[in-house]
């Protein structure tokens, strides 16, 4: 139960800090939120949660949002010691995944990239996630 309370507190702090920075709008900010979480049972690691890539600005966002987010993502994932988590929903064609496209541009060998599939429960009936993951793997 303690972990759930801690997780809820972390989520709330991130949400509150985001609201303070963006004024509760649908804007993004390049100002990072720094949270330090300590445990004697884990290695030192910096995690950077970037906004998801988008193709269209929603109401309240500037038309430049698509490029702003991509440029922000690139500024972090182009660093040589970065491990990229290329997250794609399983109910969309992986061949058109922006996350995979950008990670391949930055990390052509794929040595520093992990693909992550989300929303497996929304895949078309009869589709096998393992088969989808094997596509393009040599």
Image: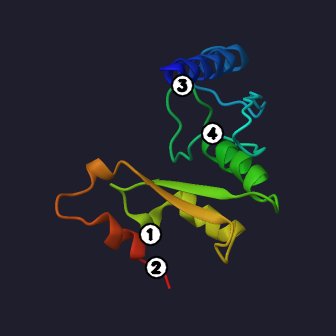
- Identify the residue at horizontal 72%, vertical 33% (top origin): 39
Q: Earlier in the sequence, mark 1 or mark 2?
A: 1
Real-space CA distance between mark 3 and mark 1, rounded to the nearest whole angstrom = 37 Å
Q: What crowding class fits label 1: few (fewer than 14 Cα within 10 Å), some (14-19), or many (20 or more)?
A: few
Label of residue 95 in the image: 1
Labels 3 & 1 near each other (Cβ < 8 A): no
Tell me which numbered mark, 3 or 4, is placed earlier along the sequence. 3
Q: How far separated are the C-alphas under marks 4 and 1? A: 23 Å
Lower sequence index among marks 2 and 4:
4
Q: Nearer the viewer, residue 52 or 36?
A: 36
At x 75% / y 46%, what residue is drawn?
Answer: 43
**Residue at the front extreme of this rendering:** 40
Q: Is 25 or 134 nearer to us in this picture?
A: 134
- Circles 1 and 2, Cβ within 8 Å, touching? The answer is yes
- Disc nearest the viewer among 2 and 4: 2
Farthest-out residue, right: 80
Which numbered disc covers residue 136?
2
In this image, 53 relative to 31: left or right?
left
Q: CA separation, marks 1 and 2?
A: 9 Å
Circle 4 sits in a helix, a strand or a loop, which is it?
helix
What is the number of the mark on residue 84?
none
On residue 3, the disc is: 3
Mark count: 4
In terms of secondary structure, where does tag 2 sit? loop
Residue found 69% across the figure and 70% down from its top: 107
The residue tagged 4 is: 65
Q: CA distance from mark 3 to mark 4?
A: 35 Å
Q: In whole angstroms, how far apart are the C-alphas of marks 3 and 2?
A: 38 Å
Q: Nearer the viewer, residue 55 or 137?
A: 137
């Amino acid at each position: 139960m303690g972990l759930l309370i801690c997780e809820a507190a972390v989520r709330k702090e991130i949400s509150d800090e985001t609201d303070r920075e963006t004024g509760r709008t649908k804007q993004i900010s390049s100002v990072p939120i720094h949270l330090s979480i300590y445990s004697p049972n884990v290695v030192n690691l910096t995690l950077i949660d970037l906004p998801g890539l988008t193709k269209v600005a929603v109401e309240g966002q500037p038309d430049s949002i698509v490029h702003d987010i991509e440029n922000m993502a690139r500024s972090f994932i182009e660093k040589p010691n970065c491990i990229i988590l290329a997250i794609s929903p399983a109910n969309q064609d992986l061949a058109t995944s922006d996350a995979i496209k950008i990670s391949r541009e930055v990390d052509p060998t794929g040595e520093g990239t992990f693909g992550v599939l989300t929303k497996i429960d929304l895949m078309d009936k009869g589709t096998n996630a393992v088969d989808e993951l094997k596509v393009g793997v040599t």
